[in-house]
Image (spheres, grey):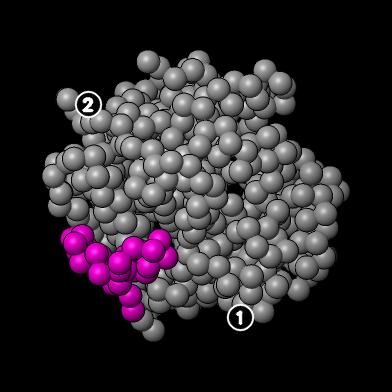
Amino acid sequence: MTFPDAALAEILTAAGIDPGRAGGVTLEGADPVLPTRYLVGAAGAAVQGAVGLAANDVWVARGGAPQRVSTDARRGALSLRTDRQLRLDSGPAPAYWAPISGFHRARDGWVQLHCQFPHFLNGVLEILGCENDRDAVAAAIAGRGAQEIEDRMAEALLPVFRMRSWTEWRDHPHGRAVDGLPLLEIVKIADSPPLPLPALPTEGARPLSRLRVLDLTRVIAGPVVGRTLAEHGAQVMRISGPHLPFIEALVMDTGHGKLAAHVDLRDDAGRATLRELAGDADVFAQSYRPTTLAKRGFSPQELARIKPGIVYVTLSAWGHAGPWAERRGFDTLVQCATGMAHEHGADKAAFAGAEAAPAHLPCQALDYIAGYLGAFGAMVALRRRASEGGSYLVRVSLAQAAHWLDRLGRTGDDQAPLGLPDPGPDDVADLSMTTETAWGRLEHLGPGVTLSETPPGWDRPPVPLGTDAPAWPS
C-alpha cells in the first residue's frame, strides 16, 4: 500500500527532481477516503503536493521566501471529483451524462458508449441501426461481439471500447506501449536563450503572476491544467471553437480564473489570431488528439518557432506511443479499456453479494490526475527555461495516469472501503466555497493544496465560453 509521500516521490522522479524533496511537503492522512480500493487519496494528495511544490519553487526563483506546502488524503481524493461536488443555486449542476452512455452487455462481454456530444451519439446510432433509446441500443449491442463493436466504432473514429481485465490490457499492444512510458515527460524541444521570469508585482503577488497561459482544451483533464495554473496567479485564456459542442457543467467546474474567448481555427483569420496570442504566451496547453492542432499549424515545434521559450503542454487519452495514439478517449473509457472498471465492478459486486458488472471509480481520477500533472510539468518547465533556456514539451495522458494509479496498489484484500458513503454537499462543506457567476450562485470545492504565504485562489469566476475578446488584457 502506497502512502502520499511515496506517491509524490514517484512524481518528482518522473520529472527529474530529487525524490527526497517529497519530505518538504506536509502530506497527512491515508486511504480509504472514497468507496473504492484504489488509492485515490494517496494519488490525489501526491499530485496536489507536486503542484504546490512546483508553485513554491517558481515563487522562490522569483525572489519570494520559501513557503510551507501541505495537503491531505481527503482533500486529495476530493480534488479528483470536483465535478461531482458542484452545485448551482443550492441544487445539482446540470446533468451531462447521455441516457445511452455507459456500459452495455454484448454477446461475449461488455462495451461502453460515450455519447455526450451529438456527433458521437449520431454516429453510434447509425452504426447500431437503432433509435436513441437505451433499451433499443442494448438490444442492438446484445447480439454482437464486444471486439467487433469496438473495431467497427474505431473505423468511424467513435469513442467506444470493450471492457478488459488488467491482464487482458497488459497483453494488448497498446497496453504494452503505455507500460513503456513514464508517468509524465518534460522534454526540451528547441534551444533559445534563458527567459527570466517576470518581476513580481508589488501588491498581490503570487507564484505565477504576470505569466500567460493559452488553454486550448476541452472536457476535464485539459481544462484542469489552466484552472490549476490560474489558482496560482497565471492569466489564463481558454480558447474554444464557436462551432464545437461543450458540456456546460464542466465549463463551470474547470473555468475558474479564466478568460474565455472564441477563435475559429478553420479560417486564416482565426489561425492568425491564435498565432498573435501565442506570441505573448508563456504556456500553451492543448488536449485534442496529438496531431489535430499540428495540422492547423500549431505543433509543439511550430509554437517554439512562434514563441521561443514556450512551454507546450499536451494531454491525450492514450499517450503518444502505440497503435491507439490517435484514438479518441475519455476518463471513463480508459477505465473501461484498461481493467479498472472490471476490477472496481468486481469489488462492488463482492461487497454487495451481487452479480459482477463493470463500474467506474467514484471519481474521474484519471482526468484530474493528468490535469494536475500537466500544470505541475508546466511550472517545472517554466523554471528550467529561466535557468537553462529552451522551449519545452510536457506530455501526459489518461492511460499513463491509469497505469500509475494501478501501480500505487490497493487498500487491502477486504471490501470494507466499498461501504463508505459517497460524499454529499454537507460532507465537503468545510472545503467548499461559493462564487457568483453568470449561471447563478455556484457552490464548489476550493483549491486542493495550501501554500502558507500565497494561498491559492481564483481572481475570476468561471464564465460561458466566448464571453471575452481573443486579446490579452493590458
Element class at badge 2:
loop
Which amino acid is tagged 1? Thr
Q: Which span is picked out in magenta?
A: 1-28
Residue 116 locus on image (x, y percent) = 63, 42
Contact, mark 2 vs mark 1 (Cβ under 8 Å): no
Question: As displayed, is residue 51 above or below residue 212?
Answer: below
Q: How far, Cα to Cα, is label 2 from label 1?
A: 53 Å
Residue drawn where x is 19% and y is 28% of the image: 204
- Residues 318 and 128: in front is 318
- In the rendered image, is residue 271 in sight? yes
Q: Does the magenta stretch include residue 2?
A: yes
Residue 228 locus on image (x, y percent) = 36, 42
Look at the image and tell me in which quarter the N terminus lies. bottom left
Outermost residue, bottom direction? Answer: 413
Question: As displayed, is residue 180 above or below residue 430?
Answer: below
Q: Is residue 228 magenta?
A: no
| Callout 2 crowding tier (Cα within 10 Å): few <14, some 14–19, many ≥20 | few
- Classify residue 121 by image quadrant: top right
Q: In this view, does 323 lie to the left or right of 436?
A: right
- Residues 337 and 381: in front is 381
Query: Which residue lies under the disc numbered 1?
Result: 167
Residue drawn where x is 25% and y is 65% of the image: 22
Query: Which residue lies under the disc numbered 2?
Result: 201
Which amino acid is tagged 2? Pro
Residue 326 locus on image (x, y percent) = 70, 53
- In the rendered image, is residue 223 in sight? no
